[in-house]
Image (cartoon, rainbow, N blue to C red):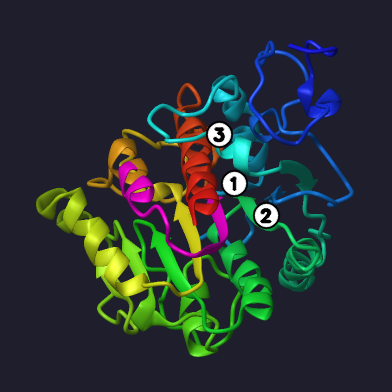
Amino acid sequence: MGKHEGDHAIHRESLYGTTPEPTYAGVASFMRRKYVTALDGVDVAVTGVPFDTATTNRPGTRFGPRAIRNASTIMAWERPYGMEFDPFDKLAVADVGDCFFDHGEPDSVPDAIEAHATRIIEQGPGLLTLGGDHFISYPLLKAHAKKHGAPLSLLHFDAHSDTWSDEDDRIDHGTMFYWAAKYGVVDPASSVQIGLRTENPDTMGFNVIDAPAVHTTGLDSVIAETRKHLGDKPVYVTFDIDCLDPSYAPGTGTPVCGGLTSHQAMSILRGLKGINVVGMDVVEVAPAYDVGEITALAAAHIAMEMLYLYASK
C-alpha cells in the first residue's frame, strides 16, 4: 500500500492507478482520487456543481456531488468488473473540488458554472462533472462547445427530454436542451436521447430511443442505433439519474416508473466504447430521498463507465 496507508485523496503520490486503502475512513474524493488545485499532468478533472434551484419538483441535488463521492469510495479499491482495463491506468484523474457560485445571486450562476468549466478544460484536462440538477449541463455544454466547436453531439440519458419550449431563457432544468438546440450548441440530428418516458411531442429533431424501446428492442439494437447517429463527432455525455427506474434510483427529484435498470444503462455505455467523448456529467442525485445510498452508488458506477468511455476513445 506504499508509504501512506490511508487518505489517498490527500497523500496519493501518483495520479495513476488503483490502490487499496481503508475507504470507510479519510477524505471522500471521487474514487479516492487526489484533490488538486494545479492541473499539470491531469488528464481528467472531476468537479462538483452543487446547484439545485432550477429544479421543478423535489430539491436537494445540491448534496449530490458529496453523496456520489461518498458512495464512490465503496468501489474505489479495484476497477469495475468487466472492464478490459482500469481507466486509472490510462488516465491521470484528479478531484478538483466544487464550483463556487453565489446562491444569493441566482442570475450569476450560469456564467459562474461556464467560467469554472472553461478554466479547467482550457488547461487541457477533460471534465467529469457531478451534479446538481440538470440545468448545469447547459453552461457546461457552452464551455465545451467553445473548445471543441459547435455544435456538439449530445448523448442524453433521461426520463425527460428537457426540451420543453421556453420563451424567457429561464434557469430551468426542463428547458436547457431546447436552448442548446436553438442556439446551435448541440446538433439534434447527431444526438441521441435514451430512456425517455414522459410526453413531449416536439422532439426538436433529436433522435429518441425511449425506455419502452430499450426494453423491447434489446441492448445491441440500442447501441448500434446510437453509434449510427453519433458517428465520430465530438460527443458530450449527460446522464440524469432519473433515467433509471425508481427501484434503482429513488433518490432523485422527479422519478418516473418504467425506467432503465442499472445493468441496461451501464451496458449501453460500455457498448459505446470508442465514441469521441469530450465531456460528461452525472446529475440529479438527491440523497435526501435515497435508500441505502443506492442512487448515489449507481451514479458513481455510471461516472466510472463514462471514464472508461473517455479512456477508450
Query: What whole-number distance in Å separates the C-alpha atoms at marks 1 and 3?
Result: 9 Å
Front residue of 42/52: it is: 42
Query: What whole-number distance in Å separates the C-alpha atoms at marks 2 and 3?
Result: 15 Å
Q: Are marks 2 and 1 in contact (CB under 8 Å)?
A: yes
Front residue of 273/211: it is: 273
The three-letter code of the residue at mark 1 reads Thr
**Quarter occupied by residue 135:** bottom right
Is 135 magenta? The answer is: no
Residue 8 image point, x, y percent: 77, 23
Left or right, 8 with respect to 275, comes to: right
Name the residue rendered at 22%, 46% in the picture: 258
Q: Residues within 10 Å of mark 1 (few under 14, many from 20)?
A: many
Span highlighted in magenta in the image? 267-283
Q: Which residue is mark 2?
A: 51
Residue 101 image point, x, y percent: 81, 59
Q: Secondary structure at mark 1?
A: helix
The three-letter code of the residue at mark 2 reads Phe
Does 246 sit above or below residue 183?
above
Q: Which residue is mark 1?
A: 61
Q: Which residue is mark 3?
A: 288
Q: Secondary structure at mark 3?
A: helix
Is 271 magenta? The answer is: yes
Q: Residues within 10 Å of mark 3 (few under 14, many from 20)?
A: some
Does 308 sit above or below residue 31?
below
The three-letter code of the residue at mark 3 reads Ala
Left or right, 30 with respect to 245, comes to: right
Foreground: disc 2 or disc 3: 2
Q: Secondary structure at mark 2?
A: loop
Residue 235 image point, x, y percent: 49, 68
Front residue of 100/306: it is: 306
**Quarter occupied by residue 91:** top right
Residue 40 image point, x, y percent: 85, 51
